[in-house]
Structures are given as C-alpha cells and as structure tokens.
Image (cartoon, rainbow, N blue to C red):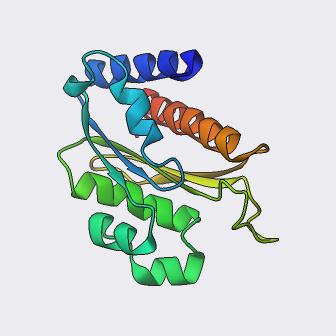
Amino acid sequence: MDNDIYELAVVVGKALAAHNMMVATAESCTGGWVATALTAVPGSSAWLERGFVTYSNAAKCEMLGVGAATIAHDGAVSEAVVREMASGALNHSHAGASVAVSGIAGPDGGTPVKPVGTVCFGWALSGGPAHAATEHFAGDREVVRKQSVVRALRGLMALLERGR
C-alpha cells in the first residue's frame, strides 16, 4: 500500500470516527481500491460499512439503483451516474457517508469527449445531496487509478469537514 494513500485513509478514518459515521464505497474503475485503502487501517471495521464494486453497467443498476436511462443519456463515466452511485451506496447500506468512482483508466476506452484519464467522483452524506466532480488524470492505467483513489479519499474528507 502506498504510504500517502495509507496516511490519507488514516485521516479519513479518524474523521469518520469523530462523526460517529460509517462509509460505503461504490467503485468502478478503481475496482475496490478505495475500500482496500480504508481496510488497510487497523480498526476500520468501526467506520467502513461496505463496498460495492460495480464495474459493469448492469451492476451499477442492480446493486446501486443507478438508472439505465441515466447511463444511456450521460454515459457510465459521468457526474450524473456517480451521484446516483453515491446515493445508491447510502440507500443500499447502513452507512452515513459514501464515495463513488467511475472512470476511463485506459489504455483503451477513451473518446474525444471523454479521453483516457477522465474520472468522475461522487460523495454523499445521509440526508443530503450527492456531490460530484470530474478530473482528468495523466499517466498509465495504474497511475490514473492511484490518483483516483487519492482524489476519492480527499473528496470524502472535504465533505466530512463541510458537513454537507
């Protein structure tokens, strides 16, 4: 485990514990790496509720309740989809916070509109709206995925600090 990711996961875990809150992850291109980072921290069972790896569109719809129409209209890599993933992770768990990731890690799959390195993130707290952001990362598949894990955790930390 990368030391920077581990240290960030420790900080996120402390913030979740301070808020007496558990988190659920909903991941596509990171394939469970956000959950892996969180579970690397001793005591994470106190604040990590569950993780969903929803790589296919069908899994996003079946496990998280993402609308097929949303995927058809906006694409699986879109802020609309990650907002629904973040909300679905809350609705299908006992967590009070969620983080979602969907992107194009490469080396294939990019388009002129959504090139390789395009990653969308969603975060939500129970009872509040889902927030989303899109980043464009440079590098190979592993570098894009690693940067995605860092951004996902930083975004979760920012949401916990804001409180909505």
Residue sitting at the far right: 112
Q: Nearer the viewer, residue 88 or 59?
A: 59
Taking the spot 74% from the left edge, 58% from the top edge, the residue there is 116
Taking the spot 60% from the left edge, 51% from the top edge, the residue there is 133
Q: Nearer the viewer, residue 164 or 43?
A: 43
Residue sitting at the far left: 94
Q: Is residue 7 left or right of residue 127?
A: right
Residue 163 visible in the displayed image: no
Q: Position of residue 11 (x, y in %)?
A: 44, 17
Residue 37 visible in the displayed image: yes
- Give the answer, above or below, for where 37 lies relative to 28: above
Taking the spot 24% from the left edge, 31% from the top edge, the residue there is 21
Residue 41, quarter of picture: top left
Count of marks placed on residues: 0
- Give the answer, above or below, for where 137 lies relative to 9: below
Taking the spot 48% from the left edge, 56% from the top edge, the residue there is 28
Q: Is residue 28 left or right of residue 62?
A: right
Residue 19, quarter of picture: top left
- Give the answer, above or below, for where 123 lies relative to 150: below
Image quadrant holding the C terminus, namely top left
Q: Position of residue 14 (x, y in %)?
A: 35, 16
Q: Position of residue 42 (x, y in %)?
A: 29, 15
Q: Is residue 42 left or right of residue 56?
A: left
Residue 57, quarter of picture: bottom left
